[in-house]
Image (cartoon, rainbow, N blue to C red):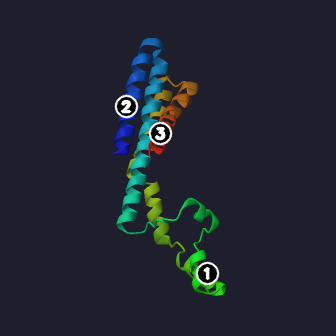
Amino acid sequence: MQITRLTLLLLGFFFLTVSLMYLFVSKEILINFIVAFVSASIVILASFITYKNLVLRRLENEQAHFDDRDYLSKIEDPYNLDQELEASDVKEVIKKEKKLLKQNKRGIKAIFSDSVNAFSFERILAYVLLIGGFFYLLNKGYLNLKYYLLFLIFPTIIVLVYLLFEAKRK
C-alpha cells in the first residue's frame, strides 16, 4: 500500500515537472531530468520492494524478533538483564549471555541469504537502467552533468519528505 502511494506521488511529481519544464527549459535539460528522475525513482522503488520482501520472508520464517519494551528501557538495559538478575546470580547470567552470543554467530548460509537481497533482480535491473541512461545521455551528447546530478536527488528528497510525513501521521 505504502509503495503504491509512493509510486503515485513520484509519478505525479514527474508529470507535473515535465509539463512545466517542457514550456520553460531547453530540450537538453528536459531529457536530463527525465532520464535522471525515472532511473533514480526506479532504483528507490526497487530497494523498497526488495526490503519489503526481505521483511516478509523473515516474518514467514519467524526470524524477526520484536522487543515490546519502551524506549527508555532499551537504553538503560539493552540486553534485558534486569529481569533475569532477580531470579539468578550475575555470573550465571553472564555465562548464559555468552553462550547465546556464540549460538547466534552468523554462518555462511545466513550471510548468503542476506546478500541475495542486496543483489536481487529488481535492484540489479534498476542500477543497469541508471547506468544505461547515463551512457545514453553521454553518447547522444545531451549529458549536462550539473543538471543530471541535481535531478538524481529529486526522488530521494521526495521519498524522504513522504516518509517523514507518514511517520508524523502515525
**Where is mark 2, residue-wise?**
11
* Mark seen at residue 85: 1
Outermost residue toward the right?
A: 91
Q: Please give the residue where the numbered disc 3 appears in the rendered image.
A: 165
Looking at the image, residue 121 sits to the left or right of residue 154; the answer is left
Q: Secondary structure at mark 1?
A: helix
In the picture, measured across the screen, residue 152 lies left or right of residue 92, that is left
* Residue kind at label 1, given as amino acid type: Leu
Mark 2 element type: helix
At numbered mark 3, what does the secondary structure look like: helix, strand or loop?
Answer: helix
Q: Which of pointers 2 and 1 lies earlier in the amino acid sequence?
A: 2
Return the residue found at the far top. 23
Query: What residue do we see at 39% from left, 18% from top?
Result: 19
Q: Residue at x 37, y 31 (%)?
A: 11
Q: CA distance from mark 2 to mark 1?
A: 55 Å
Label 2, residues with CA under 10 Å away: few <14, some 14-19, many ≥20: some
